[in-house]
């Protein structure tokens, strides 16, 4: 059977976990946490990084940090994972859903301005499949209307955006804040795990306090204050050293992991061109300002029945493909709170996106053969 996802282990995970345990300090914010955080700062230019227990937690921290209050509005795509919205709903925000682009499931940047009101506090672009949103457009709106931008970079590790200034910037380094995921379905994993990147330094000090359960414990351990106590809202957002040690084993191999995933992606992309055209299936589009990070290879089928047929035919050959994201504006939890604007592209992706298996140890050739032999609608 070819699974949809298979977590890749570099071989050093248990070595570093054992070391973390032997170091005698296994809670959080220790040796391996700092190694991982510094790695991200140096490699991608984030100003401050805090490991979290999930991307969901990083988003929740962001919502607290930007002081979301009852009734504040937050703009985001409807075609995304629930955590993108939940984090802000937990603080009382009203979510204003934007449609997706015609050529890509990412947020339709040109539709954002019409959704901005006096109550708008933030925009949360999601870099779907690790492909950049057009961040210049989004940051322009943020500057014009004094809004904050939180990048949902859950899928976007090691991916980049080149804007009008011609400088190639890492995703997660452009918005005021950004959230990453190391869930076992992502490129770099720690089982569950995540990280908040803080680019706007006005948030740096408070982020650390929220992270440490609302206390100034971090400053205390650095000797900056002589006692620590409850100074703000917060929660237990930091992972243990055991998780950070696992993550470090992955980060050490980031180049290799990325190279292999991208080559799988390229193979799918090149080999499926003719087949896709023949069957009216859309392959992923990478805009010129964006890069591909090999996170996900997806197809956009021509309709839901074609997608269902494809899933079933692949399953009969023991290949597991999956679809995802019921648009959040039509979810059982939020449909009654949705403002009612039509989001046809978001609905289309909900019906038509199909994700093919993608993981380090994948044999793409095996899948390509089955797809091309078994599934041809022209016959
Ligand atoms: C995976 C994912 C999340 C959630 O990440 P967790 O680490 O599982 O909390 C949020 N947003 C998007 C777009 C994701 O793909």
Image (cartoon, rainbow, N blue to C red):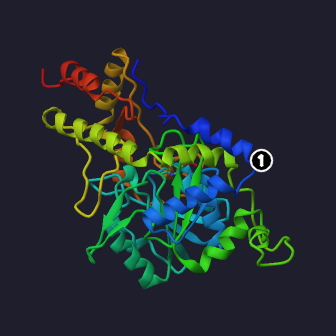
Q: Nearer the viewer, residue 218 or 119?
A: 218
Percent from the top left, x then y, of residue 206? 68, 74
Q: Is residue 257 above or below residue 76?
A: above
- On the rendered structure, is 155 left or right of 89? left
Check the image and report above or below for 227 versus 366: below
Which residue is more in the foreground, 208 or 345?
Answer: 208
Residue at screen point 13% across, 25% down: 378
Count of marks overlaid on the render: 1
The single residue placed furthest to the top in the displayed view is: 316
Quadrant location of the N terminus in the rendered image: top left
Q: Find residue 357 and report its image quarter.
A: top left
| Snapshot quadrant of residue 110 | bottom left
Q: Split into 4 quadrants, where in the image is the C terminus? A: top left
The residue that mark 1 highlights is 24
Q: Picture coordinates of residue 304 (x, y %)?
A: 33, 34
> Going 42% across and 30% down the picture, which residue do you hit?
4
Above or below residue 33? Residue 326 is above
Can you give x and y, in whole percent of width and height, for residue 238 in the image? 69, 55
Left or right relative to 367: residue 377: left
Q: Is residue 113 above or below residue 180?
A: below
């Amino acid at each position: 059977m070819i699974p949809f996802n298979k977590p890749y282990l570099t071989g050093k995970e248990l070595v570093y976990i054992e070391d973390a345990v032997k170091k005698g300090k296994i809670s959080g914010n220790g040796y391996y946490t700092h190694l991982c955080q510094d790695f991200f700062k140096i490699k991608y230019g984030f100003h401050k990084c805090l490991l979290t227990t999930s991307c969901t937690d990083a988003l929740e921290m962001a919502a607290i940090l930007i002081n979301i209050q009852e009734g504040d509005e937050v703009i985001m795509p409807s075609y995304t994972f629930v955590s993108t919205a939940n984090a802000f709903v937990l603080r009382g925000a009203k979510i204003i859903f934007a449609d997706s682009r015609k050529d890509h499931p990412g947020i339709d940047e040109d539709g954002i301005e019409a959704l901005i009101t006096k109550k708008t506090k933030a925009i949360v672009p999601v870099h779907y499949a690790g492909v950049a949103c057009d961040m210049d457009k989004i940051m322009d709106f943020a500057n014009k209307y004094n809004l904050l931008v939180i990048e949902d970079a859950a899928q976007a590790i090691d991916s980049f955006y080149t804007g009008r200034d011609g400088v190639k910037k890492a995703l997660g380094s452009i918005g005021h804040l950004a959230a990453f995921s190391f869930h076992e379905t992502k490129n770099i994993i720690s089982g569950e795990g995540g990280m908040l990147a803080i680019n706007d330094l006005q948030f740096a000090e408070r982020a650390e306090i929220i992270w440490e359960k609302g206390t100034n414990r971090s400053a205390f351990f650095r000797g900056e204050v002589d006692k620590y106590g409850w100074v703000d809202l917060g929660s237990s957002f930091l992972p243990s050293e055991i998780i950070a040690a696992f993550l470090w084993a992955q980060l050490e191999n980031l180049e290799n992991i990325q190279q292999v995933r991208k080559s799988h992606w390229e193979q799918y992309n090149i080999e499926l061109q003719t087949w896709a055209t023949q069957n009216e299936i859309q392959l992923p589009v990478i805009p010129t300002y964006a890069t591909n990070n090999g996170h996900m290879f997806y197809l956009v089928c021509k309709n839901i029945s074609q997608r269902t047929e494809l899933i079933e035919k692949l399953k009969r050959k023991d290949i597991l493909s999956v679809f995802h994201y019921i648009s959040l504006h039509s979810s059982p939890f939020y449909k009654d709170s949705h403002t009612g604007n039509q989001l046809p592209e978001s609905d289309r992706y909900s019906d038509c996106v199909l994700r093919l298996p993608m993981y380090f140890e994948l044999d793409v050739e095996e899948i390509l053969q089955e797809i091309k032999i078994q599934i041809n609608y022209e016959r």
